Image (spheres, helix red, strand yellow):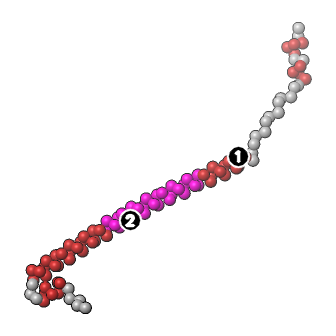
């Protein structure tokens, strides 16, 4: 298996123009690959942020449900009793306004 690259062959064979063209091509490919990697990292970070925000929203919603259920259970045990009707007093049946006549 021959591991000689086109760049090595061009450099050894005094094909400087070809070697220069191959170096430019390699440089361009490297720059494009780095740009893709950077864009991919930005996309991954944005996706992670979105997932984190969604998770926080779900946790907040679950907490709200748990709090509402706890409040409902707490409220079930404390039913208000009906107040008894006021007692009739002795003055109520023979008030002084009626007996004056």
Q: Which residue is nearer to you in this view: 77 or 13?
A: 13
Quick one: label 2, few (<14), some, or many (20+) residues within 10 Å?
Answer: few
Left/right placement of residue 50 relative to residue 25 reads right
Left/right placement of residue 54 relative to residue 39 reads right
Q: Is 73 contained in the magenta span?
A: no
Residue 57 lies, with reference to residue 11, above or below; the image says: above
**Residue 44: assigned label:** 2
Q: Main secondary structure of the magenta part?
A: helix
Residue receiving disc 1: 75
Q: Which residue is nearer to you in this view: 82 or 95?
A: 82
Q: Which residue is nearer to you in this view: 1 or 54?
A: 1
Residue 66: x and y, percent? 62, 54
Residue 83 lies, with reference to residue 19, above or below; the image says: above
Which residue range is magenta in the image?
38-64
**Residue 49: assigned label:** none
Q: Which residue is nearer to you in this view: 29 or 52?
A: 29
Mark before the other along the chain sequence, 2 or 1? 2
User: Which quarter of the figure is the C terminus placed in?
Assistant: top right
Number of on-image labels: 2
Q: Nearer the viewer, mark 2 or mark 1?
A: 2
Q: Are marks 2 and 1 in contact (CB under 8 Å)?
A: no
Residue 62: x and y, percent? 58, 55
Left/right placement of residue 42 relative to residue 55 reads left
Report the residue at 55% width, 53% height from top.
Answer: 61
Label 1 sits on a secondary structure element that is: helix
Left/right placement of residue 98 relative to residue 6 reads right
Residue lying at the far bottom of the rendered structure: 1
Quick one: label 1, few (<14), some, or many (20+) residues within 10 Å?
Answer: few
Label 2 sits on a secondary structure element that is: helix
Report the residue at 51% width, 55% height from top.
Answer: 57
């Amino acid at each position: 298996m021959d591991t000689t690259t086109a760049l090595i062959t061009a450099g050894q064979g005094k094909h400087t123009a070809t070697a220069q063209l191959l170096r430019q091509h390699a440089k361009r490919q490297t720059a494009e690959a780095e740009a893709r990697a950077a864009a991919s990292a930005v996309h991954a970070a944005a996706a992670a942020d979105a997932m984190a925000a969604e998770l926080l929203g779900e946790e907040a919603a679950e907490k709200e449900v748990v709090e509402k259920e706890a409040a409902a259970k707490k409220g079930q045990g404390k039913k208000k009793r009906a107040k008894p009707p006021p007692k009739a007093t002795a003055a109520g049946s023979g008030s002084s306004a009626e007996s004056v006549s």
